[in-house]
């Protein structure tokens, strides 16, 4: 089955628009109720997701403008994309969705290396030792950056796994 590129473009734009809407909905409800969505950029947990969402929104507007400007040229040359070639992106999206679903239950230190390993596997890496070391190193690096420098407590999960960096 063939899917037109412009239809894939629309699906991607709608997906990211929904992500932006969910981020702003969470900021307005859950984060506001917890009292962590106000104040300056250093004591406002909503500042980073809001900034990333605004940036994604700006890029979406640019993408929409570019797609409307180049619409006539692309429609003539659009042979489409075979649905089978969308397996890797769909698998990566499924892995990330599973990661987000398990993050609070299992915690950051158990789910993140597994997610990173799975993404590397889907992307085509096959050197197991390098993949394990890379996944663990990246996970620990990001944990250190968030917990030590940004003072953000990452989910410990049911086992309450946290690393005392100080």
Image (cartoon, helix red, strand yellow):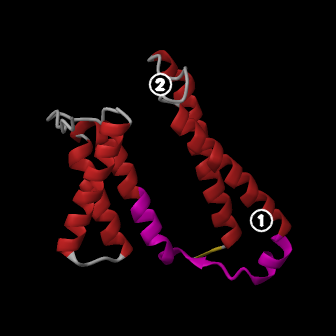
Query: Count of labels shown?
Result: 2
- Please give the label number shown on residue 43: 2
Seen from the viewer's position, the closer of residues 73 and 164 is 164
N-terminal-most mark, 2 or 1: 2
| Left or right: residue 45 compared with residue 137 | right
Residue 88 belongs to magenta span: yes
Q: Quadrant of the C terminus?
A: top left
Which range of residues does the magenta coloring cover?
70-93
Q: Residue at x 70, y 49 (%)?
A: 58
Q: Residue at x 39, y 50 (%)?
A: 97
Q: Secondary structure at mark 2?
A: loop
Closest to the observer: 78 or 129?
129
Query: Relative to the observer, which residue lies in front, 27 or 6?
Result: 27
Instruction: Answer few, some or many: residues within 10 Å of disc 1's Cα (few below 14, many 20 plus, some between 14 and 19).
Output: some
Q: Percent x, y for residue 26?
A: 52, 29
Can you identify the residue that label 1 sits on?
67
Badge 2 crowding class, 10 Å Cα cut-off, few under 14, some 14 to 19, many 20 or more, is: few
Q: Quadrant of residue 126?
A: bottom left
Q: Is residue 109 above or below residue 6?
A: above
């Amino acid at each position: 089955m063939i899917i037109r590129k412009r239809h894939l473009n629309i699906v991607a734009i709608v997906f990211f628009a929904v992500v932006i809407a969910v981020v702003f909905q969470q900021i307005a409800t859950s984060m506001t109720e917890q009292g962590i969505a106000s104040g300056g950029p250093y004591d406002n947990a909503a500042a980073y997701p809001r900034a990333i969402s605004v940036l994604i929104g700006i890029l979406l507007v640019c993408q929409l403008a570019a797609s409307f400007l180049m619409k006539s040229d692309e429609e003539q040359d659009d042979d489409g994309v075979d649905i089978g070639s969308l397996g890797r992106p769909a698998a990566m999206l499924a892995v990330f969705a599973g990661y987000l679903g398990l993050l609070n239950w299992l915690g950051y230190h158990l789910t993140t290396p597994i997610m990173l390993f799975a993404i590397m596997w889907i992307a085509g890496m096959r050197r197991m030792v390098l993949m394990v070391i890379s996944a663990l190193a990246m996970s620990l690096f990001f944990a250190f950056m968030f917990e030590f420098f940004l003072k953000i407590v990452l989910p410990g999960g049911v086992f309450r796994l946290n690393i005392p960096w100080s």
